[in-house]
Amino acid sequence: MQEISPDQANTPLFQRVGSGLLRVVSVLLLSLGSFVAIAVLTLALSMLTGILAFVFDWNLLWALVPIILGWLLLWLLYLFDLSIDPRNPARKLQHGQQKHRDDSDA
C-alpha cells in the first residue's frame, strides 16, 4: 500500500477526486489533439455558461461567448500552424505557393 503524505491526508476527498478527474480529462483531451480538445472544451464552457445563464437569469447569448472564443482560438492555431516547419513560420505560405507553381507547370 502507498503511504499518504500529511498534505494529502488533510485535503478533502472531494478535492482529491476532483483533481484526479481533472488530470484524467486533461490528459485525454490533449491526447485527442488540439483541435478536438478545443472543440470539446468550447462545448463544455458553452454548456456551463448556458446553465449559469439559466440559473442566474442572464441573457442566454452569453453562451455564445465561449463558442466565439473557441473559433478565434482555432483560427489562431490554423494561422500560426508551425507543424510544416517550426523554424520558419513563412514556410506555410511558401508551401502553398509552391503547390500552385507545380500545378501551373503541368
Image (cartoon, helix red, strand yellow):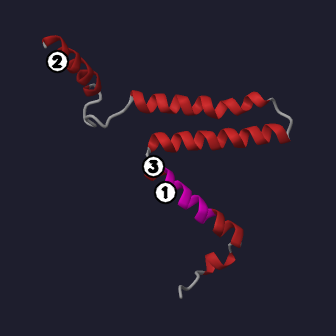
Q: Residue shown at 46%/29% (left/top)?
A: 76
Magenta span: chief secondary structure = helix
From what the image shows, is residue 59 above or below residue 18?
Answer: above
From the viewer's perspective, tell me whether residue 82 is left or right of residue 33. left
- Amino acid on which the number 2 mark rests in the picture: Asp
Residue found at the far left of this picture: 105
Number of marks in the image? 3
Q: Which mark is residue 27?
A: 1
As rendered, which of 38 and 89 lies closer to the eye?
38
Residue 90 horizontal/vertical position (percent): 27, 25
Horizontally, residue 62 falls left or right of residue 19, namely right
Crowd around label 3: few <14 · some 14–19 · many ≥20 (10 Å):
few
Q: Are marks 3 and 1 in contact (CB under 8 Å)?
A: no
* Position of residue 13 measured from the top left corner of the image (x, y, whole percent): 70, 72
Closer-to-camera residue (101/52):
101
- Asked if residue 63 lies left or right of residue 70, the reply is right
Residue corresponding to mark 3: 32
Instruction: Describe the element under mark 2 as helix, strand or loop.
Output: helix
Badge 3 or badge 1: first in the primary sequence? 1
Looking at the picture, which amino acid does disc 1 mark? Val
Q: In the rendered structure, which disc, 2 or 3, sits on the residue that comes first in sequence? A: 3
Residue at image point 63% right, 34% down = 66
**Mark in front: 1 vs 2:** 2
Specify which label sits upstream in the sequence, 1 or 2: 1
Residue 106 percent coordinates (x, y): 13, 14
Q: Secondary structure at mark 1?
A: helix
Given contact means CB atoms under 8 Å apart, are the residues at marks 1 and 2 in contact? no
* Circle on res. 102: 2
How far separated are the C-alphas under marks 3 and 1? 9 Å
User: What residue range appears in magenta?
Assistant: 19-29
